[in-house]
Amino acid sequence: MDFNIFEQRISKIKELPLPGEISHYKMAPEVRVKELLEGKIVKRNPRKAGVMALFYPGRENRTHLLCILRKTYEGVHSNQVALPGGKAENEDLDLEMTALRETHEEVGVDPTDIEVVRELSEVYIPPSNFEVQPFVGLYKRPKPFKIQESEVESLLEISLTDFLEDLNMVTKTLSTSYAKDIDVPAFKLNNYIVWGATAMMLSEIKDLLKQVL
């Protein structure tokens, strides 16, 4: 979709109710959904984080979504696809500032160049005990991205068409931090498997966009 058309239509999501868990559960393994519904997953004074779903015009002014591939490290989110963002710091006034600051640090986008459209539903991540607040933002006049090499392995510039394509929703057998060899719903984007909390956030974004595009 042409970015100018996308920009006009995405503002309509401000008026929509957030689907929240309805969207999140589409991309959660059955065992995790069962645990959530039965109240077996309890938040333990979670740390806070903010992430940014950044849409921007790419080649031929076609709309794209930016994701990152995290570096390989000793941690539960090693080498996973994610939205730019990270944990809240004391100097952050709120989680929107966290998401903007971290996006600047990780991919080099100046916060003043991002128009935040709206915040989305929080997602709790039990393995790392983070509660993540996603935001949708527009980067209307993009400059070359500059990755934070200590944390970001590479960028995934995903076309809106591929993101909205239902055929790119798949099921993969994975070993996670809480179970081995379980079927996990996921997105297949730019030949990467996107699952877990990021997939849950993307599911809500997709459900909102389907209503306005």
Image (tube, grey):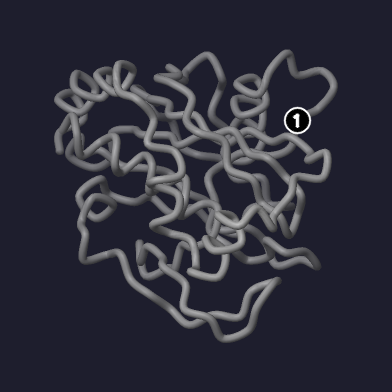
Quadrant showing the C terminus: top left
- What residue is rendered at 54% in x and 80% in y? 174
Q: Estimate how packed mark 1 is, as few (under 14), some (14 to 19) or many (20 or more) residues with alpha carbons within 10 Å.
A: many
Viewer-side residue, 10 vs 192: 10
**Percent position (x, y) of residue 105?**
67, 34
Direction from residue 182 to residue 41 in the image, left or right:
right
Residue 65: horizontal and vertical position, in percent?
A: 36, 42
- Tell me the quarter of the image containing the N terminus: top left
Circle 1 is placed at which residue position?
88
Question: How many labels sit on residues?
Answer: 1
Which residue occupies 43% across, 17% down?
115
> Label 1 sits on what residue type?
Ala
* 168 to 116, vertically: above or below: below
Looking at this rendering, what residue extends furthest in the bottom direction? 181
* Residue nearest the observer in this picture, 194 or 211: 211
Q: Secondary structure at mark 1?
A: loop
At x 53% / y 14%, what residue is drawn? 112
| The quadrant where residue 132 appears | top right
Left/right placement of residue 97 relative to residue 26 reads: right
Quarter of image, res 38? bottom right
**Percent position (x, y) of residue 154?**
54, 57
